[in-house]
Amino acid sequence: MIRPPKTCHSCPMTFLTGLSWWILIPMVFLIVGGIAIIARVVSTRVLKDHASQSSTNASPLMPTLGVLFALLSSFAIAAQWANQSAADSVVSRMSTSSARLAWASTAPGASTIEIQSALAADLTTTADDGWDQLQSGDDILFNESASYRELQQTVRDSVYSSSMSVPAASELLSAVDEVGASRHELTDAASKSLPTLLLLVLALSGIALTVNAVILTVASHRKAAYVVTSVVVLVSLDLALLLVLAAPFRGTVQTSPKAIQAVVQRIETGFYSR
């Protein structure tokens, strides 16, 4: 069987998306601000007597570069927010399907205790080790976990070796299949991170906007600080926000397993019983 390549744990995108917002924002601000300072020093030395003419040439480019950066950043942020919301919805569906399985296991003839114990063990493993695997991109290990295989085997043994009614057996099998489907949806949601090429294009457009702002104000020291600082702050915040939302299971804003853990708590308290 051919397996897809795993996520590169040392890749720059994996590293960046795993950082907290209070690290990302200052780091991006320092990088963009450093580029602005270097551009200021270089443009002052290179342009010299042509500073006024360069500012005139740079002026028409500001609206174009500004609109380009705004469109790219708004598209990227909206797409990543949609991915984050989709991941949250998948966790909610997994919680709902698990609750359905827990209720279905209370049917007459079903091995209620064994099924609910296996379900609680699988959900606990998913919320702990499984979340770490999703964060690191180990989707194969996540989908082939021993606890999940044990859950599937326990449910099928109960259905095939008991005198359950056909509707009850069908409901039990349908519920456990729904749990399995939600696991695959979860790995799909975890794999939808920000494309490196999109981040690179957005970063280049932000750098171009920053450098153009520096050239625009190279002949005016008073206006330079206000204009360039505003552009640096805008570009830095946009890029940092994009990185915060770049991966649903890494970084500051990530999908929580609380809905799954709540099902485990209800199983342990005997909520799913007749």
Image (cartoon, helix red, strand yellow):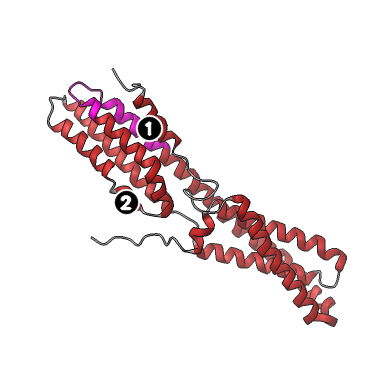
Question: Looking at the picture, which amino acid does disc 2 mark?
Answer: Leu
Residue picked out by circle 2: 141
Location of the C terminus by quadrant is top left
Q: What stretch of residues is rendered in magenta?
A: 92-114
- Magenta part, dominant SS: helix
The residue at which mark 1 appears reads as 96
Position of 262 relative to 214 (above/below): above
Foreground: 271 or 74?
271
First in sequence: mark 2 vs mark 1: 1
Residue at left 23%, top 22%?
Answer: 107
In front: 17, or 176?
A: 17
Residue 72 figure quarter: bottom right
Asked whether 166 falls inside the magenta stretch, the response is: no
Queried whether the magenta region covers residue 94, the answer comes back as yes
Residue 27 position within the rendered picture, expressed as x and y whole percent measured from the top left: 64, 59
Q: Nearer the viewer, residue 202 or 147?
A: 147
The residue depicted at 61 percent of the width and 68 percent of the height is 204
- SS of the residue under disc 2: helix
Judge whether residue 175 can be spotted in this image: no
- Above or below residue 47? Residue 212 is above
Q: How many residues crowd around disc 2 within 10 Å: few (fewer than 14), some, or many (20 or more)? A: few
* x then y, percent, for residue 34: 70, 67
Judged left or right of residue 31, residue 92 is: left
Q: Which mark is residue 114?
A: none
Amino acid type at circle 1 is Thr
Label 2 to label 1: alpha-carbon separation = 23 Å
In the picture as drawn, the residue positioned furthest to the top comes out as: 274
| Position of residue 58 in the picture relative to residue 13 (left or right) | right
Residue 114 position (above or below residue 220): above
Residue 75 in the image: x percent, y percent? 57, 55
Mark 1 closeness class: few <14, some 14–19, many ≥20 residues within 10 Å: some
Tell me residue 3's x, y (percent).
29, 60
